[in-house]
Amino acid sequence: MMNFHSVPQGDQPDERAPAVQPIPTFSTRHEPIGTVFDVSGGGARIQMSGRRLRELAGEADPSVAMSGQVGSQVKLESGGHWLLANVRHLRVTDAEGDMVAAEIDFLGEGDEDEQAGRLINFKRGITSYPIPGNRVFPVTATDLKQMFAADERPHIEIGTVYPTRDVRAALYIDALLGKHFALLGSTGTGKSTSAALIMHRICDMAPEGHIVMIDPHGEYSAAFKGNGELFNVDNLAMPYWLMNFEEHCEVFITSSGADRQQDSDILAKCLLHARSKNRAAEGLTKLTVDSPIPYTLSDLTNAITHEMGLLNKATDTAPFMRLKTKIDELKADSRYSFMFSGMLVADSMAGFISKIFRLPAKGKPISIVDVSGVPSDITSVVVAVLSRLVFDYAIWSRNELQRPILLICEEAHRYVPADKTSNGQAARKILERIAKEGRKYGVSLGLITQRPSDLAEGVLSQCGTIVCMRLNNDRDQAFVKSAMPEGARGFLDVIPALRNRECIVCGEGVSIPIRVAFDDLERDRRPASSDPAFSELWKQTGEEEAMVARVVKRWRAQGR
């Protein structure tokens, strides 16, 4: 059994130990709680005194009181430095329960202020490893402040570091946005409010920013009515001709198999003809079916009718009639008027991009695009068009003043699904491309989802920063663990035990992995996502008949 002051050195007597490895002396207020007995590349195993841990539990400093517990931090002597580590696993090593073995993951290292005896100059990663026999000490709140203190890099503060009461948790904006981020958490954990908090902090810091948020439930409009532009089916006015050919196919083509290919060939030929009739196409030598040139739906249907009447066509009239019927349906259905209205024929591309991308922002840096009123069969196409416009704009503006854009996709598992055979492949392809290549062009991607295991493989691993709230599903937990760096393993084990509005943050946006309790958000800045209070609401009654009548009227009118 090892003690706290020496380690057996094989056949050598103990009195020669100092000559082999001198142990630096540290001025510390607390006695050691254990020693190192096994070291590997990313962590170590230590042995701690159960008696010392029980003594520390009564300390007023919560950081010291938690030292040695799973998820807490400890510090080790190492070559004249302090080495900080996170406790991942505990087990008793003797029958009396007085010796506790722990597995720890290295976080970083720092120097000691000789006068104050506190940690200074903390840096992520380690340059020298401890050796078996080095002592282990508890971490104080002062040490944690130095560990988690934000440096001079631009940052936002989102909450307090667990288990402290006053150490602020910071996210570094450039690293957070430059390498994408993901916010994960089961439903009911406070995910929407936490997303709103992070976005508000970014907007407050960068009032001339450019943020586009796709809101599938219409819950964020209430949170950003003061500092954002709100769009829904009533005022979005997204022209249909902004779609590329793949998106046209998703909307206009209803067939499958061999018929789908036949319909696609006909649509491509007629769509190119319709685009070429616009004056904006004059002088263009590379006009394609993907070019965002305005055209009228009547020109498209006329081209289809013309092709159908040709005597040398290779097929019967069925493919032509399928296309023409679908286009006529979209024109006649008022639910699609936000996109397929005859009023959207004018060349409004520059104005549409300016208002959606907030160019200029004019103090409202975020656009909330509420797609809850969009018919479900084209929701993924609307998301695909918005996402592709962000990416294409970034590509074609590389010679201009750089204006990075942040695209936030709520319920991301809907649009980047793991299932490659599902509908909505256009949205999946463009969001996957942004995840892989967006950083080069100044496009940042923020994914918010409650089912990370349903996301397409590889997308989550492209997110440099992961903010993970409680996840109840084992499959989701395993998926997140596989995407997170090795040094965060100890934190990941507590994901199922997180409280509401608590999260684990790891990756590029933080110095080291941290557990954070989010700040409270002002009521008027919260999204409309609170759970109904059944116990109170089910005690109330009155006006049900009038309420149902109003709902039916709105239902039939397909408007709010």
Image: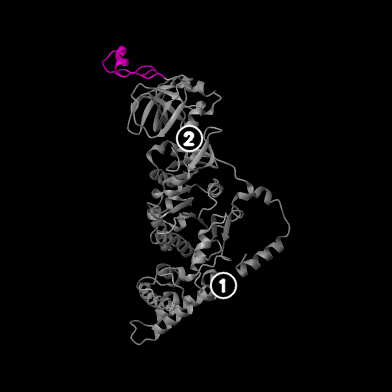
* Marking on residue 148: 2
Q: Position of residue 365 (x, y in %)?
A: 54, 54
Name the outermost residue toward the left.
Answer: 11
CA gap between label 1 and label 2 equals 54 Å
Q: Which quadrant, please, contains the N terminus?
A: top left
**Pointers 1 and 2 in contact (C-beta within 8 Å):** no
Q: Is residue 208 left or right of residue 20?
A: right
- The answer to if 6 sits in the magenta stretch is yes
Q: Is residue 406 above or below residue 506?
A: below
Residue closest to the eye, 498 or 389? 389
Q: Which residue is mark 1?
A: 334
Q: Position of residue 501 (x, y in %)?
A: 55, 42
Q: Position of residue 248 (x, y in %)?
A: 43, 70
Residue type beneath disc 1: Ser
Q: Secondary structure at mark 2?
A: helix
* Marking on residue 164: none
Q: Which of the two discs, 1 and 2, sits closer to the camera?
A: 2
Residue type beneath disc 2: Phe
Q: Is residue 203 above or below residue 27?
A: below
Q: Position of residue 258 (x, y in %)?
A: 34, 73
Identify which residue is drawn at 45% across, 24% down.
113
Counting residues from the start of the chain, the first of labels 1 and 2 encountered is: 2
Q: Is residue 529 left or right of residue 277?
A: right
